[in-house]
Image (spheres, grey):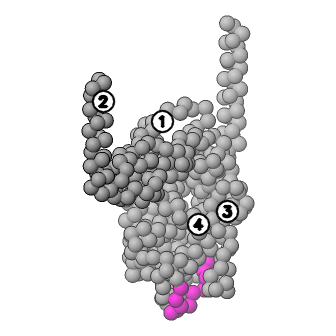
């Protein structure tokens, strides 16, 4: 018994030492930093994360959020032609050198914002969506309040220094992480933030991604860099491995290299303490789902894609899985139509969800089909009652 106790104590001391060592190794030279697990919003690491700081171009994460929401509402579309105003064309800093009256597609301007952090493209899109940059900025601040952000105020959609100190954008690493998490509700934005190099103007203009991690850190597919002399070097990044996604933000880094190194360090830390647990596999049959008015009275409900949820290494898999079906399914039903979802929760926190889709076409039945189904249902119920 004493031997077992000694071994246990040695294990605990060793494990504690490993944790202490890991914590000691995770030192951040940047003034402010945060690491967040993207699905649950769990915060893994913080350093001065609520201190209001100048965000520089990571302001554009909120700009991108409003752009994606406008696309989702269908207020605008990617093929819209945007006419460049004098105000948009005069933006300095990172830009694609828009000219007054130049016409570009919404999609090309969006690529310029997401990849190259173009200030002129940001303003052109803001004006196209809301009529003016001022109206767009008002919407940015309203959205901040909706998200409960207490340390954020915007005066422009670019992150460029204001005409006075009191008119500079302010936010915190925590608030940037929250905005980033909200932006990831529109994962299609990652198809642009993950591009390393692209072209616009029929190949005449090159877009280089300002986020070096996109090319050099496996799994990173966004989001935004920033720099001004006041803000110093900033970076909000997101990465995914084994279906586990993290958001890391560093602000006021002393150098560009440090912001990339420390963001990579934060992401590596996150990937090291979480693992992905498979809950449902693409193509599995969740259930044969009853339908009405079809040539058949049920359709296979298939898992639309793999569902893997984040769990800390060593922690119990104490999550619950529920299936919700759409009520009153009637034929015709097309293969691939969403008919339900699998929802995974832990302590009222949603860990993940995936659609259940119809596995085949079910056409609408005629009178004979419906009569046959009624007869079959009657005899099945009669048989069930007779054997109870």
C-alpha gap between disc 2 and disc 4: 53 Å
Mark 4, residue position: 191
Q: Quadrant of the N terminus?
A: top right
Percent coordinates x, y for residue 341 in the rendering: 42, 48
* Sequence-first disc among 2 and 3: 3
The local secondary structure at tag 4 comes to: helix
* Sequence-first disc among 1 and 3: 3
Mark 1, residue position: 319
C-alpha gap between disc 4 and disc 3: 12 Å
- Nearer the observer, 73 or 9: 73
Mark 3, residue position: 214
C-alpha gap between disc 1 and disc 2: 35 Å
* Sequence-first disc among 2 and 4: 4
Mark 2, residue position: 384
Q: Label 4 neighbourhood size at 10 Å, few (<14), some (14-19), many (20+)?
A: few
Percent coordinates x, y for residue 45 in the rendering: 58, 45
């Amino acid at each position: 018994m004493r031997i077992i106790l000694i071994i246990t104590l040695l294990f605990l001391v060793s494990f504690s030492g490993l944790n202490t060592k890991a914590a000691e190794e995770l030192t951040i030279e940047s003034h402010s930093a945060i690491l967040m697990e993207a699905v649950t919003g769990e915060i893994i690491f913080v350093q001065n994360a609520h201190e209001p700081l100048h965000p520089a171009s990571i302001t554009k994460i909120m700009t991108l959020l409003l752009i994606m929401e406008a696309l989702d509402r269908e207020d605008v579309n990617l093929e819209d032609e945007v006419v460049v105003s004098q105000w948009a064309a005069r933006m300095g800093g990172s830009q694609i050198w828009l000219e007054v009256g130049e016409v570009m597609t919404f999609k090309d301007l969006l690529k310029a914002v997401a990849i190259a952090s173009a200030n002129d493209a940001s303003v052109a899109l803001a004006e196209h969506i809301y009529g003016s940059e001022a109206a767009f900025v008002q919407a940015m601040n309203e959205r901040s309040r909706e998200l409960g952000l207490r340390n954020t105020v915007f005066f422009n959609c670019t992150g460029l220094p204001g005409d006075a100190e009191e008119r500079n954008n302010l936010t915190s690493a925590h608030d940037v992480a929250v905005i980033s998490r909200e932006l990831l509700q529109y994962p299609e934005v990652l198809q642009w933030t993950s591009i390393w190099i692209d072209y616009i103007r029929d190949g005449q203009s090159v877009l280089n991604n300002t986020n070096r991690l996109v090319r050099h850190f496996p799994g990173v597919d966004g989001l935004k860099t920033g720099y001004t002399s006041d803000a110093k070097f900033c970076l909000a990044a997101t990465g995914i491995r084994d279906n586990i996604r993290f958001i890391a933000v560093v602000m006021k880094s002393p150098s560009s290299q440090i912001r990339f190194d420390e963001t990579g360090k934060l992401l590596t830390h996150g990937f090291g303490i979480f693992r992905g647990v498979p809950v449902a596999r693409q193509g599995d049959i969740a259930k044969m789902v009853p339908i009405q008015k079809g040539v058949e009275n049920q359709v296979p409900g298939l898992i639309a894609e793999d569902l893997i949820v984040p769990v800390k290494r060593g922690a119990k898999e104490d999550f619950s899985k529920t299936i919700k079906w759409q009520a009153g399914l009637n034929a015709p039903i097309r293969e691939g139509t969403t008919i339900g979802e699998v929802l995974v929760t832990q302590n009222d926190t949603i860990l993940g969800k995936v659609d259940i889709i119809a596995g085949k076409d079910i056409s609408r039945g005629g009178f004979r089909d419906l009569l046959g189904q009624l007869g079959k249902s009657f005899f099945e119920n009669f048989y069930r009652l007779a054997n109870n």
